[in-house]
Amino acid sequence: MSNTLIIIPTYNEAQNVQPIAAAVLDVAPDVHILFVDDNSPDGTGHLIDDMVQNDERIHVLHRQEKDGLGRAYIAGFKWALGRDYELVFEMDADFSHNPKDIPAMRAAAETADLAIGSRYIGGVRVINWPLHRLFLSRGAGIYVKLVTGLPLTDPTGGYKCFHRRVLKAINLDRIVSNGYSFQVELNHQAWRMGYKIVEVPIVFEERLSGQSKMSKRIIFEALWIVWRLLFRAKFKRHHPCLQPQAAAE
C-alpha cells in the first residue's frame, strides 16, 4: 500500500478529474488519490466512480451536499487517518496546483511536519491572475502575519503535505473555518503546537476550466477568523521554539 494520499475536493469538476488524476499518477505512480465529491450536479461523482473501477489507486468519498472546502478536507483527513497513510496532501482539481511539484513537496516533508507550497517565496509565482486577486492574496498573507504572528509567506495556499502525526494531533472537529481561511487555521494550529513547517516554492496558475469558488462570504470569514485564532492563542503572536522555514529551490 502507498504511504501517500492526495486529497482532491470536487464540485462540478467533470472536465478536470480524469486529466488531474492522470497527471498526478504520471509524476507519482506510487501515490493514491482520494476525490471528495460534494454531490456535483454535473456528474463529476459518476465519472470518478468509473475511474475507481479502473484503477485501484483512485478512491472516492461521496458527500450528500456542497458543504465547503474545509468540511470536504476534514472528511478526507478522517478517511486517511482511518488507513495507513503517512503523508497526506491537499490539492486542487483544476491544475492551479501543478502535479509536477509533488516530488518536491514529498521531499520537503521528509524533514518537516508540514510542507506548504508557497506562491511568494523569492518573488511572485502566479500566472493569469488579475491584479485584484493578487493584491487580495498578498494582502491576506500580510494581514494574517500582523494579527496572529504566523510567519508564512503564503498562509492561505492550499497545496500542502501533512505528516500523519500532525493531523492526528489537531482536533479536526474543532476547526471552525470552511473557506480559504481553513488553510490559515490549520497552519496556525500546527505552528502553535510546535510542528516544523517548511515552505516549498511553487508556480500557481489560475484554473484552466470551470469556475472559481471565491465569494464575499469566504472573504468575510477570512477577515474574522484570524482574530479568533489570536484569542485562542491567548494573544500570543510568536512561537518560542520553532519557525517555519523555506525549502531550498
Image: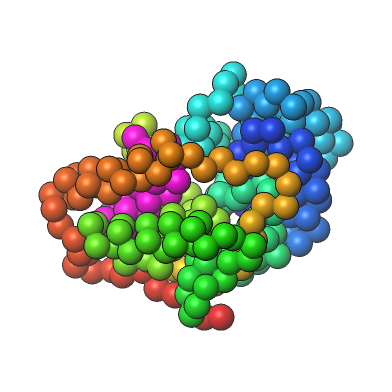
Q: In the rendered view, does 215 fall on the left or right side of 126?
A: left
The image shows a total of numbered marks equal to: 0
Q: In the rendered view, does 206 fall on the left or right side of 43?
A: left
Residue 109 appears anywhere in the view: no
User: Residue at the location (50% across, 66% down)?
Assistant: 118
Residue 18 appears anywhere in the view: yes
Residue farthest along the top direction in this orientation:
64
Is the C terminus in the top left, top right, bottom left or bottom right quadrant? bottom right
User: Residue at the location (72% across, 52% down)?
Assistant: 208
Point out residue 207 in the picture as x, y percentages from the top left corner: 67, 52
Magenta region includes residue 78: no
Point out residue 237 in the picture as x, y percentages from the top left corner: 19, 61
User: Residue at the location (45% across, 46% down)?
Assistant: 180
Q: In the rendered view, does 40 fall on the left or right side of 169?
A: right
User: What span is in magenta?
Assistant: 176-195
Magenta region includes residue 181: yes
